[in-house]
Image (cartoon, rainbow, N blue to C red):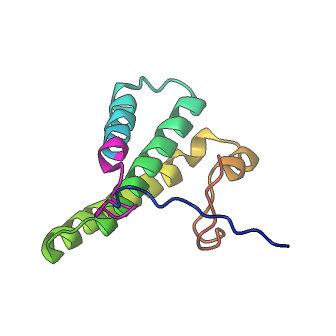
Amino acid sequence: MSSVLEFRRPYKKTAASPSCYGLPDVLRNVVAWLAQVQAFEIQTIDDARQAIFILELANGCIQLIVGQTRLKETTRTTLLSQSARIDLLIAETRREATCLFEPTDLKSWIADDREQSKGAPRSI
């Protein structure tokens, strides 16, 4: 004989979509990351790696937030183009910093955009 399980429904359904939930927390984290990079006194290769990683992470979060937030199309386009410019500056910094690393060491922490498959996480 089978039994039927009854589950209670949640009391309140929120109108906010799950993607917007916690947005202030995400923004606080992004601000904290950027403040951390600004306060960095980069002295070692690991410091440089960490700064580049944090900048990429923060910029990726900003792109996701802009993509999921209701904005005027011109505002969205402007913010995404500025974020793309930041991506280019980070990539340029990585290319210019290659002289700081051994060729084998560099490949272990920086994923070259040409070799990285789409959607694959970058490794440190």
Q: Residue furthest bottom?
A: 73
Q: Is residue 79 left or right of residue 5?
A: left
Q: Nearer the viewer, residue 48 or 16?
A: 16
Tally of marks: 0
Q: Is residue 5 left or right of residue 47?
A: right
Q: Nearer the viewer, residue 33 or 19?
A: 19
Q: Is residue 63 magenta?
A: no
Look at the image and give the residue range highlighted in magenta.
14-26
Q: Is residue 23 magenta?
A: yes
Work out which quarter of the rendered image holds the N terminus and state it: bottom right
In the displayed structure, 98 sits above or below 19; it is above
In the displayed structure, 75 sits above or below 42; it is below
Residue at (50%, 23%) from the top-left corner?
Answer: 43
Q: Residue furthest right?
A: 1
Q: Is residue 68 left or right of residue 42?
A: left
Find residue 77 and report its horizontal and vertical position in percent: 22, 73
Residue at (40%, 59%) from the top-left corner?
Answer: 87
Residue at (70%, 69%) from the top-left corner?
Answer: 4
Overall secondary structure of the magenta stretch? loop
In the displayed structure, 54 sits above or below 3; it is above
In the displayed structure, 113 sits above or below 58; it is below
Q: Residue furthest front?
A: 1
Residue 110 seen from this side: yes
Find residue 104 and report its horizontal and vertical position in percent: 76, 49
Find residue 110 and report its horizontal and vertical position in percent: 62, 52
Q: Nearer the viewer, residue 50 or 13?
A: 13
Q: Is residue 42 left or right of residue 16?
A: right
